[in-house]
Amino acid sequence: MKKHIVIVGGGFAGINLIKSLRNDKRFKMTLVDKNNYHFFPPLIYQVATSFIEASNISYPFRKLFSESKNVKFHMGTLIKVNPETKSVETDTGTLTYDYLVLALGTESNFFGMENVRRCALPMKSIEEALYLRNHILLTHEEAARNKDMNQAEKLQNIVIAGGGPTGVELAGMLAEMGKYIAKKEYPEIKLSLSGIYLIDALPALLSPMSKLAQEAAYEKLKELGVKILLNVSVKDYVDSRVILSDGNSIETETLIWTSGVIAREVKGIPEESIGRGRRILVDDYNKVQNTESIYALGDLCLMLSEEKFPNGHPQLAQVAIQQGRNLAANFKRIEDEKVLEPFRYHDKGSMAIISKYNAVVDLPKHSFKGFLAWLTWLFIHIIPLVGFGNKVQLALDWFRLFITNNPSIRLILFPKRNTGNGAHMNP
């Protein structure tokens, strides 16, 4: 009998596990995801800023595994895990499993601030990125029409909460687009009224990275005109006003939230198996503590047993990729009745792009910045993309866009459906 592995979540961890087992006839796999596509989160900010198309970083699951006879796709949202019956409930049906792999990732953490949760703009999914793209374009159109100086300034201000890699890359991209595009395409707007604010509660940008990376990011963003506020956090967002922890406030219609994440909730997992940040506690082999045949991977899991990472592994793509491959190898070892290999993370470094031709790269023993770092960033971010066509298309798009400084996909699109009587309504 083939062992049935149900994988919930088609991110880096889930995809790499499936790829490692798809030619092994001893297993059949069902991938469960609420979307019908895999996407590449590190480049989602480029979708939000109209730099690249969503299709450049996305790939349909069914096409990806169309040649794999032992892989099926089930589109649905996880509702609950039932360990006692070895089944999972989704909003589109129930599946039974021999092994269950949870790889749902994270969602935005608003730290209990209800107004921020309701009104801020997160950027964790393709849908959120496209919504943010529309929002930025719409506020610019409104600012171009507005004759009231105070209102125009509020429409043009953009506040980014979170000075990690996503916040830094987003701030740099928006600043450059303002410099190269807004000046030409929005002559009605007084750019002197515009402000891009990057806010972080810590004393440095890119806090997990090297001092060289932190200083390079700070200096280049300052040069681009980004207003950096450190040792300050967002406390509320009321009436289009961002309230800061130092008592100051910024009027804006655009608060972009990249400030923190929390693991997605998985109902049915024992409470004692949930750790800090709602992450699921796992052993050396990614098996969920206090359960049988249930595993957790990537950003969702918290492994405290590796000596080099006593507080858990960083929530990075490389961790998820390596865990997915290690668990796949261990499933094979289980079938072969061999000794399992504990997961040990191989840190390959981290990087962030700051602006055109400028990035920072931290390798395990060396850090560098500038043009070479920028080329390294481009190369590393093309390699993991799923699908040869995606890699070629993105490389060509980047080459053209960085030369012309003028992406042409700034379209405000509202998907609608026909009601049958000539009228249209939102889905």
Image (tube, rainbow, N blue to C red):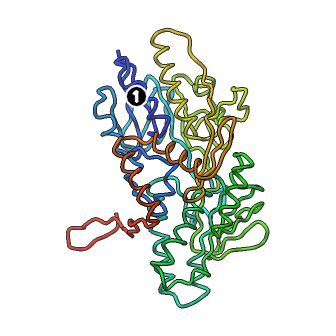
**Left or right: residue 142 compared with residue 243:** left
Residue type, numbered disc 1: Thr
* Residue at far left of view: 421
Query: How far across and how far down the image is residue 116, in percent?
Result: 62, 64
Seen from the viewer's position, the closer of residues 2 and 59 is 59
- Residue at x-position 31% and y-position 39%: 62
Res. 349 image quadrant: top right
Seen from the viewer's position, the closer of residues 292 and 384 is 384
* Residue at far top of view: 337
**Left or right: residue 24 compared with residue 363:** left
- Picture layout, residue 17 above or below residue 412: above
Res. 126 image quadrant: bottom left
Seen from the viewer's position, the closer of residues 146 and 33 is 146
**Left or right: residue 261 compared with residue 132:** right
- Residue at x-position 48% and y-position 61%: 48
Query: How far across and how far down the image is residue 251, in percent?
Result: 64, 77
Position of the C terminus, as image quadrant, is bottom left
Position of the N terminus, as image quadrant, is top left
Residue beneath label 1, please? 96
Crowding around mark 1 (Cα neighbors within 10 Å: few <14, some 14 to 19, many 20+) is: some
* Residue at far bottom of view: 147
- Residue at x-position 54% and y-position 35%: 320
- Picture layout, residue 187 above or below residue 134: below
Query: How far across and how far down the image is residue 119, in percent?
Result: 57, 67
> Regarding mark 1 in the picture, which secondary structure is present there?
strand
Q: How many marks?
A: 1
Query: How far across and how far down the image is residue 280, in percent?
Result: 61, 35
